[in-house]
Image (tube, helix red, strand yellow):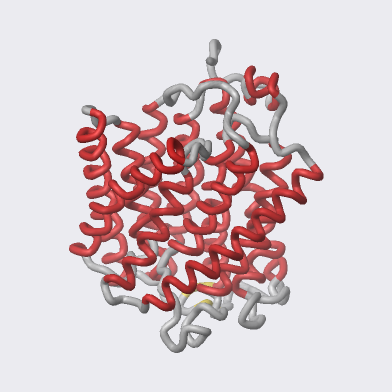
Amino acid sequence: MNGADTAWIIVATALVLFMTLPGLALFYGGLVRARNVLSVFMHCYAIACLMSILWLAFGYTIAFGDGGAYWGGLGKMFLMGVGNDDLSGTLPEILFFAFQMTFAIITPALIVGAYVERVGFGFVLLFSGLWMLLCYAPVVHWIWGGGFLADGGIFGETGVRDFAGGIVVHETAGLAALIIAVFLGPRKKDTTPPHNPGYVMIGAAMLWVGWFGFNGGSQLAADGGAAMALTVTHISAATASLTWALWEKVKFGKASLVGMVTGTIAGLASITPASGFVGPIEALVIGAIAGILCQEAVNLIRNVLKIDDTLDVFAVHGVGGIFGTIMIAVFGAGSFAAQLGSLAIVGVFTTVVTVVLVFVVKAVTPLRVDAETENSGLDIIVHGERAYDHAS
């Protein structure tokens, strides 16, 4: 065990949990109407709790157990056989478990943005739990757990390069979000501007800080690689924030706060897979493109395809993660065959599992709330509370 590595990953684990609670909750909560803000908080909080238990029970062993090329087996259910002195590299394995648990929390929580303001709470919990176990955890094993897409797998000695989750986190969550949005259909009432842009900015800022643990922690060591991952993460986020705002100014004559901080998230998602393989100049390029690319993806999904992915999960996270994964090959840090092939394999798998789960789960619990609940707001009807005295 290395003390410095252990201390850093303890901090990184806290930072990644901070991304979901309260970062993502505030970011998404500020973007919805006032009558639904507590429901968004509830979704993020409940998912964090449920994924923690499921990761302990089955998720960790599926992802990082000693099984074969396609899944990790059930040998480490409930952390059986894992004690204080067991190591994963230079870290206590129990700490590696906790660090990866925070990734298993935020990935299904990202999907929340696609279905806010109209989804059934039971559906959120049942779908998220099954999706994490049956979609996310196997993909983790394939790429990070020594599975068939990793080094020595179907792409040879140099497998796919995905440092912190461009495929594992952002492609899977983005595609699932898009699919659920299609099944749900659009919200019944005309959309309104975000009820609290201040929440959105605060949440985005928390995500930005937490992302240092997300990407820097993925080095699993306190060394120069972690420092570089942290630095390029920051550079990409800053650059994408500016290019998003500039592109808004060019197109609409005004640069908005919500737009700028959405650009931050686009830059962070795009650098995530590449953060362990590129330097500051490449990060500038990735961020500069991401701010414009993801904004145009928002326009495509929302205005051209007319899909109500409410908070633009696929356009920002899905497109950003896919773009960053491809840029690894563009910059020569990975092969195009491995990067594109893995994107395709995981994309097909995620699509099939998500579609099947939507049909199965909605047969058990309603996918969408009724019209009266949607009009009155999920906060008061579903949870019996209001965020404000006069929520609209």
Q: Is 177 on the left or on the right of 208, as rendered?
A: right
Q: Is 144 on the left or on the right of 180, as rendered?
A: left
Q: In this orientation, which residue lies closer to the viewer: 378 or 300?
A: 300
> Could you say which quadrant of the image residue 245 lies in?
top left
> Could you say which quadrant of the image residue 2 lies in?
bottom left
Q: Residue at x 33, y 73 (%)?
A: 329
Q: Residue furthest left?
A: 281
Counting from the top left corner in percent of width and height, residue 122 is at 73, 39
Asked whether the viewer can see residue 231, the reply is no
Counting from the top left corner in percent of width and height, residue 348 is at 58, 64
33 in relation to 319, above or below: above
172 in relation to 254, above or below: below
> Could you say which quadrant of the image residue 78 lies in?
bottom right
Q: Is 245 on the left or on the right of 296, as rendered?
A: left
Q: Residue at x 54, y 41 (%)?
A: 114
Q: Residue at x 56, y 42 (%)?
A: 112
237 in relation to 140, above or below: above
Counting from the top left corner in percent of width and height, residue 137 is at 61, 65
Q: In this orientation, which residue lies closer to the viewer: 331 or 195?
A: 331
190 in relation to 13, above or below: above
Q: In this orientation, which residue lies closer to the viewer: 189 or 48?
A: 189
Q: Residue at x 32, y 43 (%)?
A: 263
Q: Residue furthest front?
A: 304
Counting from the top left corner in percent of width and height, residue 337 is at 41, 78
